[in-house]
Image: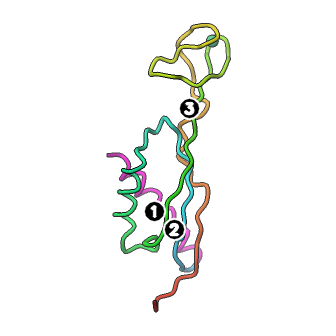
Amino acid sequence: MHEFSIADAIIHVAQELVQQNGGGKVEQIHLRIGELRQVVPDALLFAFDILKQDTPLSDASLEWETVATRVRCKTCGSEYHPNDIFWECPSCGATGAEVVAGEELDIVGITLVEGSDGD
Ligand SMILES: [Zn+2]
């Protein structure tokens, strides 16, 4: 389940940000995830909820938008959204295309709040 390694990487980045900030807690993390990453949403949330324990992210929520796959035909240059595992160009019928979008795994934003130890 590669969602655990994704969640781990996200938490690592957020923890570094908290350190640079001199403390505080993470309230929300916003991601962009490409379709080609084949992330299972429930699995990612599950992994995140486990790994965030005992970190400054313990109350953090995770949100993301999915980026649709887009590829560019190497023969005619048209861009399209592949409908199945065979990337067949709807314009010229050629297979073989390069990925334009869909491999994203970006942290768009991390919202920090000042930590309070006493509650
Ligand atoms: Zn084409």
Ligand 1, seen in the image, is in the quarter at top right
Q: Which residue is mark 3?
A: 69
Q: Which residue is mark 2?
A: 16
For label 3, the SS is loop
Name the residue type under label 3.
Answer: Thr
Q: CA distance from mark 1 to mark 2?
A: 6 Å
- Quarter of the figure with residue 107: bottom right
- Most extreme residue toward the left is 1
- Residue 12 colored magenta? yes
Marked residue nearer the N-terminal end (3 or 1): 1
Residues shaded magenta: 1-21
In terms of secondary structure, what is the magenta stretch mainly? Answer: helix
Disc number at residue 12?
1
Pinpoint residue 22: horizontal percent, then vertical percent. Answer: 57, 80
| Cβ atoms under marks 1 and 2 closer than 8 Å | yes
- Quarter of the figure with residue 92: top right
Pinpoint residue 9: horizontal percent, then vertical percent. Answer: 44, 56
| Label 1 environment density (alpha carbons within 10 Å; few <14, some 14–19, many ≥20) | some
Name the residue type under label 1.
Answer: His
For label 2, the SS is helix
Of tags 3 and 1, the one toward the viewer is 3
